[in-house]
Amino acid sequence: MPLNFQRGQQKEEPEINLVPMIDVLLVILIFLMITTTYSKFSELEINLPEAAAEKQEDRPNEIQVGVDAQGNYSINKKPVVAASAEALAEELKRAAGGRPDPVIVINADAKATHQSVIRVMEGARSAGYPHITFTVLQSAS
């Protein structure tokens, strides 16, 4: 008669090893974090700065470009009809009158579109005038 040594012992339940599953989930999580793009530009609140510097003296070699809220342009206080950067470049060259390397001063309305200001900057670049500056409202401090 064979002896049964297992009579009083309980069989152990098999355990599921969670370590490989956690490793796989961690790799998937890292992959998702790396491939996800985050757009934070829509969440930014931008407060534009005010200038507190002294008024700069008039320079003889500058071209004043005005941009109103509707996107209309004026060069040296003369209205200009320009719908593209190339047309603005031609008008800037005409306003420079052969003067070398004029400074383009952009007087943009606070409600002017970003595109209209960029169009002036692109026109200045096309005309070969790299020196651009902006006028701002002086803060009352």
Image (cartoon, grey):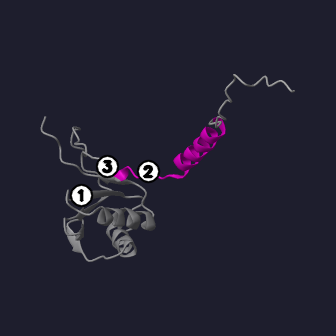
* Residue 37 point in image, percent of width and height: 48, 53
Badge 3 amino acid: Glu
Q: Which residues are magenta?
A: 19-41
Mark nearer the viewer, 1 or 3: 3
How far from the left and from the top, in percent, is residue 35?
54, 52
SS at badge 2: loop
The amino acid on which the numbered mark 2 sits, given as a three-letter code, is: Tyr
Q: Nearer the viewer, mark 1 or mark 2?
A: 2
Please tell me which residue lies in front, 35 or 114: 35
Q: Which residue is mark 3?
A: 43
**Position of 44 relative to 92 (above/below):** above
30 in the magenta segment: yes
Amino acid under label 1?
Answer: Asn
Q: Look at the magenta stretch and give its main secondary structure.
A: helix
Residue 3 falls in image quadrant: top right
Could you give the CA–CA distance between mark 3 and mark 2, rounded to whole angstroms? 11 Å
Badge 3 or badge 2: first in the primary sequence: 2
Real-space CA distance between mark 1 and mark 3, rounded to the nearest whole angstrom: 28 Å
Q: Position of residue 31 (x, y in %)?
A: 58, 48
The residue lying furthest to the right in this view is 1
Pinpoint residue 132: horizontal percent, then vertical percent. 36, 55
Disc 2: which residue: 38
23 vs 107, left or right, is right
Quick one: label 3, few (<14), some, or many (20+) residues within 10 Å? few
Q: Which residue is mark 1?
A: 107
Quick one: 139 or 45, which is closer to the camera?
Answer: 45
Q: Mark 3 and mark 2 in contact? Answer it, CB < 8 Å.
A: no
Q: Residue at x 31, y 47 (%)?
A: 44
When asked about the image quadrant of residue 100, the answer is: bottom left
State whether residue 60 is above or below residue 73: above
Quadrant, the N terminus = top right
